[in-house]
Image (cartoon, rainbow, N blue to C red):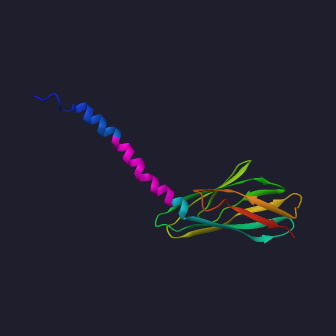
Amino acid sequence: MEGTNAPDRRAVLRAAVWSAPVIAVTAATPLAAASAQALSWTWTAQMITSRQAQTNFTATNSTDDPIDVVFVAPRLQGAVELYGYGFGSWAITLTSTAVVCTATVPAQGSLTTPFLGYFTRTPPTTEVLVGSLTPSGSSVPTLTLTFT
């Protein structure tokens, strides 16, 4: 027979069930923070003419684990209309408003692809292009194009 001060078996079971998720969430937080800080990028213009520009985007992972990367850029940015094409490990999805590029950057590695192209209906002199990167790197991806 159990004593009056002994814990109820159901109470012990409930306490064990509720404590497990708290431990799992706490353990996952440092990994997510480390991934965001370990991702860097470059976005450069390879070719610029009066009507178009071809660009290269590189994502670099300095961790020992692969990182899933998503780069998103609006289709229309000023006088520039963005179109996409993919090579290698990058997957490209075009919508009416955005270009979405996804890849898994290997541990201690980089992925580069000329997956973004720009066509100008009315050529500007200069246009600043922006995108977003997930997980976020040290800054928001931008590229200034000067058309000749």
**Which residue occupies the extreme left position in the image?**
1
Q: Which of 32 and 68 is in front in this view?
A: 32
Find residue 78 and report its horizontal and vertical position in percent: 82, 55
Whether 22 is drawn above or below 100: the answer is above
The quarter of the rendered structure image containing the N terminus is top left
Q: Nearer the viewer, residue 34 or 145?
A: 34
Q: Residue at image x 77%, y 65%?
A: 144
Q: Does the magenta stretch include residue 9?
A: no
Find residue 64 and report its horizontal and vertical position in percent: 46, 67
Numbered-mark total: 0
Q: Nearer the viewer, residue 19 or 145?
A: 19
Horizontal side, residue 63 vs residue 3: left or right: right
Q: Locate residue 114: give its quadrant.
A: bottom right
Find residue 146 and report its horizontal and vertical position in percent: 83, 68
> Magenta residues?
19-34
The quarter of the rendered structure image containing the C terminus is bottom right
Q: Residue at image x 58%, y 64%?
A: 89
